[in-house]
């Protein structure tokens, strides 16, 4: 058995697909995107968005009366593009193509037009809509922001390996500087159709599938999906899709230097009056050390560090979806993270369940029973 054969074994994950199950990739995608580029939001209060952004560890690169760009320390595009709107909403995901020619190829294959982006971002794009109705923008040739001074990871004495002598550890209580955007998680009532769309149009490949207890024969209900850059390793997931009663943003994740930066940054956020949703812990699928927070508009955002990196040779793992299977260690998963805490969001999701069960989609009564079991498993 090779190292790749065992990469998914033991930690709540089975060896791989059974005969006839989803292969997790397509043979001839239209293009293969290289990475996630940025996320777009609309918010009525840009001052409040900027204040939280700074506390979370972003640096503003553009601020006008109607627009806010927030970046990490890595070179490249901003992580977030926030425009002023009447109400708060997630506006879409941008992915970075390898070249401008890929943007043209994707536009021609989908009957869309290539257009130039504003000078504040630069480059070209094609705007698409996935089967769940989410806006998907594929971009290339953006202005490249230079790197900013980054937070230096601490030097650790691990066991008997002494790398730090006559020097103390005193991580400052300050924002955990975001390095880059890592991934976004979206929920859809048309999970399988949406999954296949991303694999075919953007050339993404699945790292891990999850299925409901007793329903593996019906297929997966969640997938962690990465970019395919051949022998170049990429994040375990750049996009995650999950089946649910509504089409919505779930959370996004931003890399920081290490656990101490995350923990000290979390203390800083707490002291500023912001609310932790769940953490600190370590995930199973993806292995990331995580810490989840709610921004002032209720959006769930994650600091992460030490995530898995896979090349294209690794096939998808399969595991049962459970609440306990969300982490290897850490505090018990919260009702807030699961979206079942009493409040506006849970009421909206309950109403969505009624609507979804009436509509023609993949979220039916057996899937509802499977989802309800997850929260108590």
Image: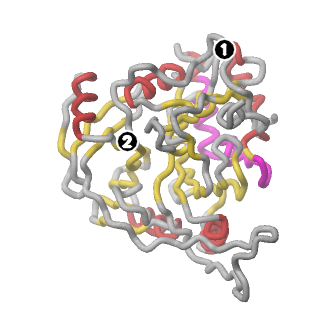
Q: x and y percent of residue 62 in the render?
A: 30, 65
Residue 33: image tag: none
From mark 2 to mark 1, how far is it between C-alphas?
A: 30 Å
Q: Which residues are magenta?
A: 328-354
Classify residue 79 by image quadrant. bottom left
Its colouring scheme is secondary structure
Front residue of 190/99: it is: 99
- Left of 197 or right of it: where is 128? left
Please name whichever residue, 97 or 65, is drawn nearer the observer in this view of the structure.
Answer: 97
Looking at the picture, does residue 370 appear above or below residue 265?
above
Q: Is residue 301 magenta?
A: no
Whether label 2 touches label 1, CB < 8 Å: no
Instruction: Confirm whether the magenta stretch covers residue 337.
Output: yes
Residue picked out by circle 1:
218
Q: Quadrant of the C terminus?
A: top right
Mark nearest the camera among 2 and 1 is 2
Identified at 79% across, 41% down, the residue is: 324
Q: Is residue 222 left or right of residue 33?
A: right
Instruction: Locate residue 232 relative to residue 245 in the image: left or right.
Output: left
Task: Please name the residue that numbered disc 2 is placed on.
Answer: 95
The answer to which of 88 and 285 lies nearer the viewer is: 285
For the point 32% across and 38% down, which residue is it? 138
Q: Position of residue 148 (x, y in %)?
A: 40, 71
Query: Residue sitting at 23 percent across and 58 percent down?
Result: 120
């Amino acid at each position: 058995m090779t190292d790749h054969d065992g990469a998914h074994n033991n930690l709540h994950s089975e060896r791989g697909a059974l005969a006839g199950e989803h292969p997790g990739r397509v043979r001839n995608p239209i293009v293969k995107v290289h990475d996630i580029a940025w996320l777009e939001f609309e918010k009525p209060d840009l001052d409040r968005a900027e204040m939280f952004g700074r506390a979370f560890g972003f640096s503003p690169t553009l601020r006008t009366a109607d627009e806010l760009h927030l970046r990490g320390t890595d070179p490249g595009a901003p992580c977030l593009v926030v425009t002023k709107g009447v109400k708060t909403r997630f506006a879409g995901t941008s992915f970075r193509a390898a070249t401008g020619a890929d943007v043209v190829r994707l536009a021609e294959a989908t009957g869309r037009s290539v257009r130039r982006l504003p000078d504040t971002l630069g480059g070209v794009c094609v705007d698409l809509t996935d089967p769940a109705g989410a806006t998907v923008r594929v971009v290339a040739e953006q202005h490249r922001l230079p790197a900013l001074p980054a937070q230096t990871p601490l030097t650790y004495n691990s066991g008997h390996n002494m790398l730090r002598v006559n020097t103390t550890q005193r991580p400052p209580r300050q924002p955990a500087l975001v390095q880059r955007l890592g991934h976004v998680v979206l929920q859809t009532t048309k999970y399988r159709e949406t999954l296949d769309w991303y694999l075919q149009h953007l050339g993404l490949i699945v790292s891990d599938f999850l299925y409901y207890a007793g329903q593996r024969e019906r297929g997966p209900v969640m997938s962690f999906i990465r970019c395919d850059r051949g022998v170049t390793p990429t994040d375990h997931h750049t996009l995650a899709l999950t089946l649910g009663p509504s089409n919505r943003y779930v959370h996004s994740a931003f890399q920081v230097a290490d656990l101490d930066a995350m923990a000290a940054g979390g203390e800083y956020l707490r002291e500023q009056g912001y609310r932790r949703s769940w953490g600190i812990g370590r995930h199973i699928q993806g292995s990331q050390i995580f810490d989840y927070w709610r921004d002032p508009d209720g959006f769930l955002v994650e600091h992460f560090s030490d995530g898995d990196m896979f090349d294209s040779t690794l096939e998808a793992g399969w595991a049962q979806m459970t609440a306990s299977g969300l982490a290897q260690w850490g505090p018990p998963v919260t009702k807030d993270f699961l979206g079942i805490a009493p409040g506006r969001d849970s009421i909206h999701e309950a109403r969505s369940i009624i609507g979804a069960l009436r509509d023609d989609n993949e979220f039916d009564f057996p899937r509802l029973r499977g989802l309800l079991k997850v929260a108590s498993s």
